[in-house]
Image (cartoon, rainbow, N blue to C red):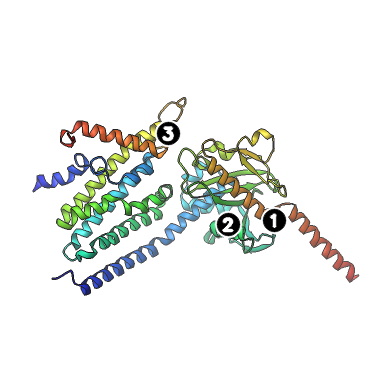
Amino acid sequence: MASKLKETILNPIFKGNPITVLVLGICSSLAVTVQLKGALVMALSVIVVTGLSSLVCSLLRKTIPNRVRIIVQLVVVALMVILVDQILKAGEGTYAIDKQLSVYIGLIITNCIVMGRIEAFALGNKPIPSLLDGLANGAGYGLILIIVAFFRELLGSGTLFGLQVLPASYVPNNLVILPPFALILLGCIIWVHRALDKDLQED
Amino acid sequence: MNTNNNVYTVIYTTVIVVIVAAVLAFVAQKLGPAQQANAKAETLRQMMAAAGVKPVEELYASKNDQILDLYAENIAEAYTVDLKGNKVADLSIERENIKLEEGLKVQNRAIKAGQGASLPVYVFKSGNIVIPVYGAGLWGPVWGYVALKPDCHTIAGAYFDHESETPGLGAKIKDEAWFREKFIGKTVEWGDDVIFSLAKNAEATGATNAVDAITGATMTSKGLNEALNTWFRAYEATFGLGAFFNALEEHAVSETANTEEE
């Protein structure tokens, strides 16, 4: 049982990462990875949303009418997303970051990872494993987000978390700031991931 | 239990939606005041950054309460005007009841429609007069606050913000201090065809009412240029030559009235 729980937590972060293996949640990972700070808040928000949505849907799993289950899931996910957004807006310290992320917090609703994990895991498993699965998938997403944001902020602005780290003589690369570069970077991460993990390689 | 029959499905979805709606309504009510306070403090920060009350970094490092204190200490009067330059209403400047005109989007629409606008004017104790501008950038709205010196002609400072311009490109209107500092000392040419010009190579013409557009952010610059000109045009009757003529006319009317009395 313990090893199964460990597997539930670790698999989505590394071997079965939702972005690099399932290739879900790509859109927002292109949009919010220009700066580390934004990426970190986005990652935390997604972790909270996937975790709580999976938990609630798992608690409701035996009562949800099968024909409308997607709609019920959507309502639960939307609730969580709006709660996160409202709380970020109300905090004195988080208000500026919420403004910076603008619509992308709200668009977590459309992040395939959230609904995907509810469908694939939460509806067939007990609440605690579902919660962990949701949190871990959010963390897997967040990990990639932060890796991408690290390179984009470093090469695109010469800073990390807003602090200048590259010498002032470094000329920021404008391509890095634009969304296509995130796609290129993501491709490289998927390449490295597949090269390291023999199981993921196709013949 | 059969969870697939129609009655169950309808009741189930109804109950879920009602519960969710209740939770959201409750949260919105609880958090609403905090969110509004954040939004108001944000607006005050930007206005005071434009007016030069304190450096931008200091304003953003201050808590909301300190911002309210600072505003109450530095503001002289605040009111709204219409497109003809007539005063519409006073905006409270008391510490506990600070009123701002925050619906810039609505006002922008009113300006375009040519009627019903109530445009805010914030006069600081330093003599600087802060007015807002608002328009469409590349991805979303862009807006800002421009502070005029007491002569209503020279720009004392400016602060710009945006909802979702590209970081590193259009977002420079907010992020780069050099951009807003370029506006200091420039002029607003009330009554001219081009009141202010934010365009490529604009500074090279030697005009005092021109600032160069940002390289790589053509659309954002264009949007901000449009915002500046639209709003300056709307304030023309208040600050421009029109205001002078209006005053003259009123003066003439009262003169005639006086003569008649005699």
Residue B207, position in %: x, y? 69, 37
Q: Nearer the viewer, residue B238 or B97?
A: B238
Residue at left 28%, top 60%?
A76
Instruction: Measure how far apart labels 3 and 2 are at the Cα level.
Output: 34 Å
In this picture, residue A6 sits left or right of residue A114: left
Amino acid of disc 2: Asn
Up-down relation of residue B257 to residue A74 (above or below): below
Amino acid of disc 3: Leu
The mark that comes first in sequence, 2 or 1, is 2
Q: Nearer the viewer, residue B169 or A68?
A: A68
Does residue B52 appear in this view?
A: no
Numbered disc 3: secondary structure: helix
Numbered disc 1: secondary structure: helix
Residue at left 38%, top 50%?
A104
Q: Please give the residue where the numbered disc 3 appears in the rendered image.
A: A175
Residue at left 33%, top 52%?
A108
Crowding near the residue tagged with mark 1, few <14, some 14–19, many ≥20 C-alpha atoms within 10 Å? many
Numbered disc 2: secondary structure: helix
Q: Please give the residue where the numbered disc 2 appears in the rendered image.
A: B108
Crowding near the residue tagged with mark 3, few <14, some 14–19, many ≥20 C-alpha atoms within 10 Å? few
Residue B37, position in %: x, y? 46, 57
Instruction: Measure how far apart labels 1 and 3 are at the Cα level.
Output: 45 Å
- Give residue B238's mark: 1
Instruction: Choose mark 3 or mark 2, whichever is in front.
Output: 3
Amino acid of disc 1: Thr
Residue at left 22%, top 65%?
A67
Q: Residue furthest bottom?
A: B7
Please give the chain letter of the residue carrying mark 2: B
